[in-house]
Image (tube, rainbow, N blue to C red):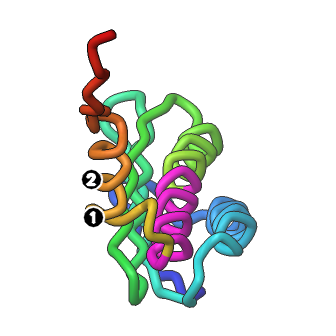
Amino acid sequence: MKLNFAFKHLDRSEALEKYTKESLEGIGRFLLKDGYGSVYYSKTNHEFCVEVSVNTREKYFRAVALNSDPYEAVDAVMSKLEKQFLKTRKVVQNHKHPELSRTGKLDQMNGQFEVNLRMKKAA
């Protein structure tokens, strides 16, 4: 995955870039297609803000996290992105199953609401 790094009110850190790249490669395996992304580090008051945006064929992913430690902020962003990746992967892989489509869900609901209208003969 190709990444662009930007720093605002913060000195460029090779260690932080490497840590982010390794973390993103770890969760990037959940993506079906390879994409490109940008990582934006900033510091406001005493908090570090990490914003990661990833663009793929399927979708545009974005996550932001604030923390007093930049590495913990990166971990928080990666956990948010991992959830988004897994959700999108599930939707893309299961798109041909009829029970997951709108008509399939309606058919399931209709089956629940059908009433057996057999008339019993009086004895």
Q: Main secondary structure of the magenta part?
A: helix
Residue 105, relative to residue 15: is it above or below? above
Label 2 sits on a secondary structure element that is helix
The residue that appears at 50% across and 47% down in the rendered structure is 80
Task: Kindly identify which residue carries mark 1.
Answer: 103
**Mark seen at residue 92:** none
Circle 2/circle 1 CB separation < 8 Å: yes
The residue that appears at 70% across and 74% down in the rendered structure is 29
The residue that appears at 56% across and 41% down in the rendered structure is 76
**Mark 2 crowd level (few <14, some 14–19, many ≥20, 10 Å Cα):** few
Residue 30: give x, y in percent of width and height. Answer: 65, 70
Taking the magenta stretch, the answer to whether it contains residue 88 is yes
Residue 83: give x, y in percent of width and height. Answer: 54, 50
Disc 1 residue type (three-letter): Thr
* Quadrant housing residue 40: bottom left
Residue 91, relative to residue 115: is it above or below? below
Q: Residue furthest top?
A: 123
Residue 14: give x, y in percent of width and height. Answer: 67, 69
Disc 2 residue type (three-letter): Leu
* Quadrant housing residue 39: bottom left
Task: Kindly identify which residue carries mark 2.
Answer: 106
Q: Over which residues does the magenta segment extend?
A: 82-96
